[in-house]
Image (spheres, helix red, strand yellow):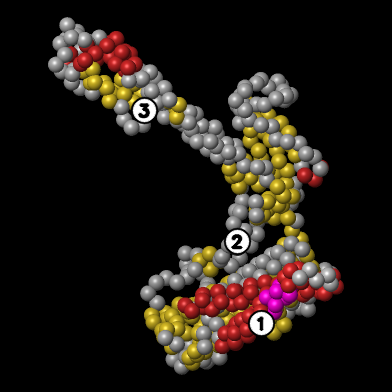
Amino acid sequence: MENGMNFVRVSLPVDNMSATVTILPTAEPGSVTDQDVLSVLRNQKITYGIDEDLIKALVNDHSKYGLPFVVAKGVMPIEGANGYYDFKFDISNEARKPAVLKDGSTDYYNIRVFQNVKQDDILCEYIPKIVGENGMTVLGTPVKAAVTRDLPALRGSGFYAEYVREFTGKDVDLETFNPKDGGKKAAPKADDASQDLEEGKVLPGRVKMGIRTLYKAAIDGKPEFKFGNLNVLAVCEIQGDVDLSVGNVNYHGDIQINGNVTSGFVVNATGNVVVNGMVEGAIIKAGKTIQVKDGVVGNNKASLEAGEDVIASFAENAFITAGRDVTANSLINCQVEAGKSVIVQGKIGTIIGGTIVANTLIQADNIGSLGGIKTHLRVGCDATVLNELNSLTKDLEKAERELSKIELAISMMEEKKIDNVSLKMQLLHTKIDKAAYIYKYREITDRIKKNIISGQDAKVIAVKAIYPGAIITINVQSVYIDSEYGDIIFFNKDHKILSKKLDVDVHV
């Protein structure tokens, strides 16, 4: 009788994660045994995941001859996951823009400029890494799962870490670390070695069950995650008005004023300033964003200057400067300058009078008035900016030539070994000063160049109407509006100001 192994064919896929056996249909019933199949598998070094019961059923059923059957299966690796932080607050550090409501109005009141947390609030949870499980091919070759990694503990201030181990359905406090206490307790580590946990006691060594790390606020304040550091910053909160009872306010951080800022007073903050009331003829400066919920009645004395955005329900007779955007429901006789855009929308949505300047966009529902009040709108970069850039570029080129001469002089002194310490120190100090000057003004020129590029596509948009009396300047070209136009956009092309009807919803 012919050897039954001759009737067994085995095939393997490229990944060797399975083995398929086919018994040739020419084999007589009973001529192939399960041992014949196992021998063929062994000869091909297939040793893992073999289904011997299936093989026995296969050789005993002649109707299955000629059909392929998977008789061995490998195990795919179970991939783990890297550790990560699950933040419970918005870490974008961006002030929210006013929301446009269903009725078309704009909500200037419920804007979150910064977030507040209370002491012991959870700021974030660290989810530790999950270690993957290796797999195995049918050839007995391990298939390694990807290596997973944990992240380092968060650094910063104004928070503490609480380590909790999940055990038999209960959370058991392990250790807490509060930076205020000066402690240096390390978090317990997770490991493959399981161990018991006695009631009310943590045994020494490593633990297997998952460790949850909760980062909680140590103080009331504003949470912030920047440059990999977590901080809870104290917020200066003034319950009433800024007036004679309070005086001028200067604060390194964020200020929240729950009343008004009355005429003649100054509020200065390196962070954000939120005024839940009104600003009268006062001066407010902020390194980040200024928000005025009840509006600005400036009497030509109010000045708002923000490094980022200015957001107000309305402003009248005020001076406003923003590094990025100015957003309001109405601007009446204001002098406004924005590094990016000015957006005026809401139930009123009107710009009347004054001068509005923005780098890329001025957009309002209505611009000007039926009475023909002069309203100046300027976007892009004018001749003054171009002249400034040319002047700075020439100064920089001169400074760079002078720096090259200084560096050459220092090099020659070193080559010729001239021992004049006083002269060398003077040259080094001059080199440092000149390099600092070049670095500073190179940043300024780069910023101006970016503004010029972004201002090339500058636009003025009147969503509903623009009235006679409005004067539009885009880059260096100007146009006087002598008729009323509706839903229109003005732009610059080929050194001319052109206009067209709006064909999209432009509300931002």
Secondary element under disc 1, as helix, strand or loop, is helix
Amino acid marked by disc 1: Lys
Q: Quadrant of residue 486?
A: bottom left
Residue at the disc numbered 2? 94
Residue under pointer 1 = 398
Q: Where is residue 143 in the image (x, y as percent from the top left)?
A: 45, 29
259 lies above or below 361? above
Q: Can residue 388 be seen in this view?
A: no
Outermost residue, top direction?
1
Helix, strand or loop for disc 3: loop
In the rendered image, the vertical position of residue 15 relative to residue 366, given as above or below: above
Q: Against 178, is 50 above or below?
A: above
**Residue 37 covered by magenta stretch:** no
The boundaries of the magenta stretch are 402-410
Q: Mark 1 or mark 3: which comes first in sequence?
A: 3
- Disc 2 secondary structure class: loop
Residue 17 is tagged as: 3
Q: Which amino acid, by three-letter code, is at mark 3?
A: Met
